[in-house]
Amino acid sequence: MTDLVDLQAPAPARRTPRSLTLSVGLVLVGLHLFVALLTLFWTPYDPTAMTGGRLEPPSWAHWAGTDRLGRDLFTQIMIGSRIALTVGAGAVAIAAAIGVTLGVLAAFATRTLDDVLAATFDILIAFPTLLLAMLVVAATDTASLFSAILALGIAISAIVARLTRILAKRVLAMDYITAARTAGSSWPSIVFRHVLPNIWPTLSVNFALQFGIAIIAEASLSYLGLGAPPPNASWGRLLQEAQGTVYTAPFGAVAPGIALVSLVIGMNLLADGLRDVGDPTRRRSR
């Protein structure tokens, strides 16, 4: 009888392996982060110095070749990693500060104010992120790295605010929030002790996704001449400069394109991995 019971007993649950997408995303993003930090102390060449001939192909001296002015392209791509990560982190930080604040206020607001804020968020989201960023950059009357970060942060904040409002309202409808209010907890205490900790896992996934969107948008702004001005080696500006020589020297466009795509894919995989970690149901279904 004992043996029968032992045979029928469920096997102990296996420990869930770490998400593969999270690991790959961390590797790709970590590689770009390492390169970005390395440029603060060392680069193969001076990014503004003409160290070779014009449009040289990749070689041992210049791993990614040279651009139309004879500057080392690999050095500029390394600098581009630092600019991309700076813009992504700055834009997400601004979007988080504005979006989370407005989203929580909308969740606590009266019905009329909540409807007004929700409609405002929807209208702003209806505009493409790049278009909103271009309008903000145009309003500042100058193209700079700071204006690009500010523009993208403001453009993304509407998406963050809308998501925060939905998540916060869902948490506020829980019974333990009513119990906390009955116990005499203040609204600030409820926000920091109950609302934000419960919505943060979902928000972190969205932040990772918006990070990738900000990187693409910054590259687009730089391609249009509205991003970081020279001598900042933004990937978008490198692509714009290589446009005229894409047939005679294709690696000038391929190399920064690969760097841009790899970082964006890394951020998307990181977001997907964070979603897997935060949702055990998704992990078991894979």
Image (tube, rainbow, N blue to C red):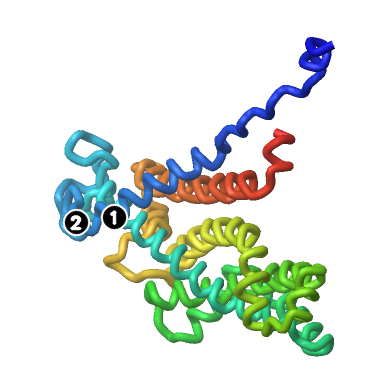
Residue 66 placement (x, y as % from top left): 25, 47
Residue 203 placement (x, y as % from top left): 62, 62
Determine contact: label 1, label 2, CB under 8 Å: yes
Residue 62 placement (x, y as % from top left): 21, 41
Alpha carbon distance from label 1 to label 2: 8 Å
Q: Name the quadrant containing residue 168.
A: bottom right
For mark 1, does the 10 Å Cα neighbourhood hold few (<14), some (14 to 19), or many (20 or more) residues? some
Q: Which residue is mark 2?
A: 41
Residue 225 placement (x, y as % from top left): 42, 69
Q: Amino acid at mark 1?
A: Leu
Left or right, residue 71 beside residue 279: left
Left or right, residue 80 beside residue 184: left
Q: Residue at 27% x, 37% y: name it.
A: 58
Q: Name the quadrant containing residue 27.
A: top left
Q: Can you tell which mark lies on residue 37?
A: 1
Q: Residue at 59% x, 70% y: name it.
A: 156
For mark 2, does the 10 Å Cα neighbourhood hold few (<14), some (14 to 19), or many (20 or more) residues? few
Q: Is residue 111 above or below residue 76?
A: below
Q: Name the quadrant containing residue 5.
A: top right
